[in-house]
């Protein structure tokens, strides 16, 4: 067998320790598959004394991860620190400058600097591989970039954040509160270092921006993603969704059409009969639609040590084999810059929950605002009767333009009997 592929790992948290454990267990099998053994020669993290449950006896320790990227005797640097800036970025840039391949799980870094990092890697004939950055253990980057290379893709969408899917699933199944379930997701190693990135939709937006780049051959444009998280989804919305035949999912959706590229992340009402409605807990699902292949669906665990390590090590095996795919489908300098379409251009149905004072004329005022914007109502639900007290009222609309819906909602929110900002969840018939 050939010489080992020498690897340095920056970051030994959930994912870094997971990579170590995977290599310890499956190392011999992977060596046969990769044609070379994989040997971790150096590691870096902040706290040398922390027990990580892995054997570091034969590995060089660096307190400074950037120094390790520059000086360790390795061919590949694996960046598992996280964050768009700071040490993670320095590690990747230093490794490429020093002629080492990079493997990373860092979607924040790629969403912000992916195009530039790809250009640096390609200029030197190096790889920057990032399968683990999108949808955890699902090999979606390879599937889209290599497996669907013959197609023109028009849409890619899915459940891209395991933490949010876990929270929404557990809230529905157990009735537990948002904060409790989030704490579980953190204990299970699903959440980002700052979990607001998960629950506010930012992590899914990072992944969507990367997916769109790979699917459409476009420059990564994170700033153009419309982002909403799940904080305003309440137990009563989950209950109303059940009554109306929907499940609530945080989806990322990217669509490329004649008019341009729309990228959006927000909670969605998904009809119960669609497969994506049944993707539960930490599972992610990604759907890609191509002109010749039609619809392709991939599902798997989207977060956690094992699934993420699986994707990281698959990238290392590619490097061991000498496989050097283009970072984002086309050379970085040839990636297109389509017009960015805002959320106002969306057309579809809407679920709106209002907290109103229960008194005559309130619904007439609400429906007048909808009528004036030509928004057609499909159904309305009011639970309970509480004269002059607070009651929830749910409206479901037929397909309408987001811009018109927004204007109507602005007017509705200003009505004296409407007590809180309306909760709006878009209905997606996927
Ligand atoms: P953790 O917070 O568990 O681990 C981060 C590691 O980075 C820790 O070992 C920490 O050191 C080390 N670190 C932090 N700052 C520095 C620094 N300045 N210099 C050197 N080391 C540093 O994160 P995860 O393992 O969960 O995530 C790592 C990456 O993988 C992130 O980009 C994340 O988005 C991504 N990812 C995570 C998934 C998951 O399910 N957790 C799934 C897919 C991607 P120390 O331990 O000493 O504090
Ligand atoms: N925090 C992320 C999630 C990790 O929950 O999906 C996987 O990228």
Image: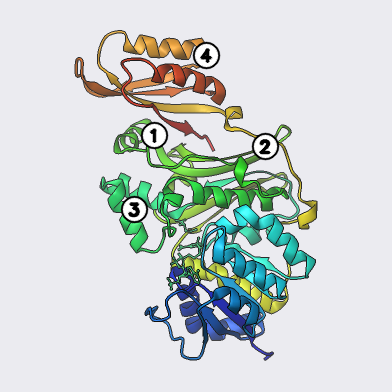
Residue 292: mark: none
Which x, y percent locates residue 80? 53, 68
For the residue carrying disc 2, how many other residues have a C-alpha within 10 Å: few (<14), some (14-19), or many (20+)? some
The residue at label 3 has a CB less than 8 Å from ligand 2: no
- Residue 240 lies, in percent from the top left, at 33, 32
* Circles 3 and 1: CB atoms closer than 8 Å: no
Q: CA distance from mark 3 to mark 1?
A: 25 Å
Say whether mark 2 is within 8 Å of ligand 2: no
Q: Which residue is mark 2?
A: 340
Q: Identify the residue under disc 1.
A: 245
Helix, strand or loop for disc 3: helix
Pick whichever of labels 3 and 4 is earlier in the sequence. 3
Work out whether residue 105 can be spotted: no
Mark found first going from the N terminus, 3 or 1:
3
Q: Earlier in the sequence, mark 2 or mark 1?
A: 1
- Cα distance in 3D space between marks 4 and 2: 25 Å
Q: Is disc 1 surrounded by few (<14), some (14 to 19) or many (20+) residues within 10 Å? A: few
Q: Nearer the viewer, residue 407 or 238?
A: 407
Q: Nearer the viewer, residue 24 or 79?
A: 79
3D distance between C-alphas at marks 3 and 4: 38 Å
Numbered badge on residue 182: 3
Which residue is label 4 attached to?
Answer: 373
For the C terminus, the image quarter is top right
User: Cα distance, mark 2 to mark 1?
Assistant: 33 Å
**In the image, is residue 393 above or below residue 296?**
above
Of the image marks 2 and 3, the number of the one nearer the N terminus: 3
Gap between marks 2 and 3, in whole Å? 33 Å
Local SS, label 1: loop
Under tag 2, what secondary structure?
Answer: strand
| Residue at x 54%, y 44% (from the top left corner) | 252
Q: State whether residue 111 appears in this view.
A: yes
Residue 263, placed above or below residue 357: below
């Amino acid at each position: 067998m050939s010489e080992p592929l020498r690897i340095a790992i920056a970051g030994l948290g959930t994912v870094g320790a997971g990579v170590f454990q995977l290599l310890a267990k499956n190392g011999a099998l992977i060596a046969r598959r990769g044609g070379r053994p994989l040997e971790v020669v150096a590691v870096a993290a902040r706290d040398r004394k922390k027990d990580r449950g892995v054997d570091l006896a034969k590995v060089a320790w660096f307190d400074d991860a950037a120094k390790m990227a520059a000086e360790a005797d390795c061919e590949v640097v694996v960046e598992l620190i996280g964050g768009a800036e700071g040490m993670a970025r320095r590690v990747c840039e230093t490794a490429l400058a020093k002629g080492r391949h990079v493997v990373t799980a860092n979607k924040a870094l790629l969403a912000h600097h992916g195009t530039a990092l790809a250009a640096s890697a390609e200029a030197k004939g190096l790889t920057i591989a990032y399968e683990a950055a999108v949808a955890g253990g699902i090999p979606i980057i390879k599937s889209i970039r290599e497996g669907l290379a013959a197609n023109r893709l028009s849409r890619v969408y899915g459940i891209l954040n395991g933490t949010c899917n876990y929270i929404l699933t557990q809230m529905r199944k157990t009735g537990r509160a948002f904060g409790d379930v989030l704490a579980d997701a953190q204990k299970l190693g699903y959440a980002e270092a700052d979990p607001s990135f998960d629950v506010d939709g930012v992590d899914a937006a990072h992944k969507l921006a990367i997916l769109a780049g790979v699917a459409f051959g476009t420059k990564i444009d994170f700033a153009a993603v419309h982002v909403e998280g799940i904080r305003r989804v309440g137990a009563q919305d989950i209950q109303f969704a059940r009554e109306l035949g929907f499940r609530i999912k945080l989806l990322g959706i990217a669509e490329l059409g004649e008019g341009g590229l729309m990228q959006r992340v927000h909670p969605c009402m998904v009809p119960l009969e669609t497969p994506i409605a049944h993707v539960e807990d930490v599972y992610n699902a990604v759907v890609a639609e191509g002109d010749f292949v039609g619809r392709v669906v991939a599902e798997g665990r989207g977060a956690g040590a094992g699934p993420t390590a699986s994707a990281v090590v698959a990238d290392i095996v590619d490097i061991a084999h000498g496989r050097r795919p283009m970072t984002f489908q086309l050379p970085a300098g040839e990636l297109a810059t389509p017009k960015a379409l805002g959320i106002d251009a969306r057309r579809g149905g809407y679920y709106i929950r209002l907290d109103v004072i229960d008194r005559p004329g309130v619904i007439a005022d609400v429906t007048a605002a909808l009528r004036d914007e030509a928004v057609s109502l499909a159904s309305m639900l009011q639970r309970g009767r509480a004269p002059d007290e607070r009651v929830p009222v749910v409206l479901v609309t037929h397909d309408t333009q987001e811009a018109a819906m927004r204007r109507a909602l602005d007017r509705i929110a200003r009505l004296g009997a409407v007590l809180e900002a309306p909760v709006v969840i878009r209905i997606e018939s996927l």
